[in-house]
Image (spheres, grey):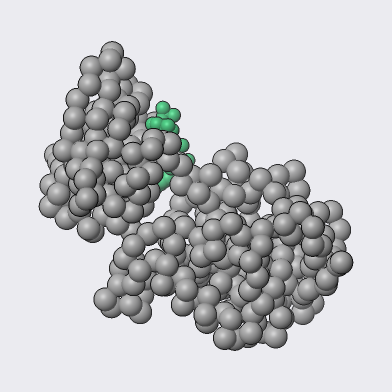
């Protein structure tokens, strides 16, 4: 059975919920599908201390529950379900949910987010949220004056390592190649920071820990030599996957797969389709920037529908 809606929002992180809050208040009766991870990446973090208006911090899942509650109280139609197919070739756009239900949408707001890459070690999964993190800006504060490691040699890894170096006693960078991939400027910052030690040609064999969380990591150099480092935090900075597989071939994406938008707007290459949050943002990736871009997408969408 087909259903017609004015605004369909795909994804339920800060961008999606904010877009729902704004479009509901504009009387556009949005429908939002929450996807496989309702609440998005923040539901996998603990305390969030950098989201304004929470002077004592707030747990990631609670922050998302509050955003959801706010959207729901205002009247947004929030549904569990995952969008499995979209056809953006004509309006209304045809959207399939859970492989069966079909929705015809006059406009779409895509806020499907991005997923941090992990190494795939069972020990890394075990300590996720207990010392293993993919966001130094979110979690670095908890490791003040302790030793930590950052995996990766790109700009993000360098940025996160220098950020952590300002809080932590020592930062190891675990880099699998004999060089950093990051820009020269970022590399210089790393090499000029005395409490960062770069371990080139090292891979992580295992993250070690106990009831208190991460206590160390077993590393192996490419020549086979193993060593253990004692650390309290293990940060991944090996890139993110934007969740854009559904839109490939239909929307313009950049080389890394992020949705391209026009300037500071949320407008994608297809009229009536807007993108918000990490799915279009490889650079900032913060809850507050995602929420802000959800607002932008809602306003762009409202103007589009009013035309
Ligand atoms: P990148 O893809 O640039 O770098 C990923 C890093 O992780 C590489 O060093 C890569 O190693 C390493 N890596 C990947 N997989 C593994 C693995 N399984 N085990 C160990 N190491 C691994 O990602 P970034 O997130 O750093 O950057 C993404 C984009 O965002 C880039 O274009 C970057 O320039 C940009 N950016 C810009 C910033 C700025 O200008 N301020 C800040 C942050 C990001 P290898 O080199 O061997 O492949």
Viewer-side residue, 104 vs 270: 104
Left or right: residue 123 versus residue 120 is left
Left or right: residue 253 versus residue 100 is left
The C terminus sits in image quarter: bottom right
Viewer-side residue, 41 vs 307: 41
Residue 140 appears in the figure: yes
Image quarter for ligand 1: top left
Q: Residue 298 lies in what quarter of the image? A: bottom right
Residue 158 appears in the figure: no
Q: Is 163 placed above or below 26 here?
A: above
Left or right: residue 20 versus residue 171 is right
The N terminus sits in image quarter: bottom right
Where is residue 169 shown, x and y percent of the image? 13, 47
Where is residue 119 shown, x and y percent of the image? 41, 36
Q: Residue 47 lies in what quarter of the image? A: bottom left
Viewer-side residue, 163 vs 238: 238
Q: Is 170 placed above or below 87 here?
A: above
Please report the residue visible at 52 percent of the width from the left and 82 percent of the height from the top: 70
């Amino acid at each position: 059975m087909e259903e017609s809606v004015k605004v369909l929002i795909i994804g339920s992180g800060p961008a999606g919920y904010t877009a729902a809050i704004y479009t509901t208040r504009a009387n556009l009766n949005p429908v939002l599908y929450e996807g496989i991870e309702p609440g998005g990446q923040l539901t996998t973090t603990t305390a969030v201390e950098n989201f304004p208006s929470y002077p004592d911090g707030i747990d990631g899942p609670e922050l998302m529950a509050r955003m959801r509650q706010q959207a729901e109280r205002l009247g947004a139609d929030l549904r569990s379900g995952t969008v499995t197919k979209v056809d953006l070739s004509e309006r209304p756009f045809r959207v399939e949910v859970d492989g069966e239900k079909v929705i015809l949408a006059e406009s779409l707001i895509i806020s499907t987010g991005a997923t941090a890459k992990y190494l795939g070690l069972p020990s890394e999964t075990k300590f996720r949220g207990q010392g293993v993190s993919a966001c130094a800006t979110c979690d670095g504060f908890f490791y003040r004056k302790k030793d930590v490691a950052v995996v990766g040699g790109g700009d993000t890894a360098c940025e996160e390592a220098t950020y952590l170096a300002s809080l932590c006693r020592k930062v190891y960078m675990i880099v699998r190649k004999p060089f950093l991939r990051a820009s020269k400027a970022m590399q210089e910052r790393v090499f000029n920071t005395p409490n960062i030690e770069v371990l080139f040609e090292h891979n992580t064999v295992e993250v070690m820990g106990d009831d208190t969380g991460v206590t160390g990591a077993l590393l192996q150099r490419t020549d086979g030599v193993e060593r253990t480092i004692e650390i309290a935090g293990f940060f991944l900075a090996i890139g993110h996957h934007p969740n854009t597989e559904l839109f490939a071939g239909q929307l313009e994406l950049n080389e890394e797969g992020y949705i391209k938008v026009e300037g500071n707007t949320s407008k994608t290459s297809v009229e009536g389709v807007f993108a918000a949050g990490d799915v279009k943002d490889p650079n900032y990736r913060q809850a507050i920037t995602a929420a802000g871009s959800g607002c932008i997408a809602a306003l762009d969408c409202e103007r589009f529908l009013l035309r």
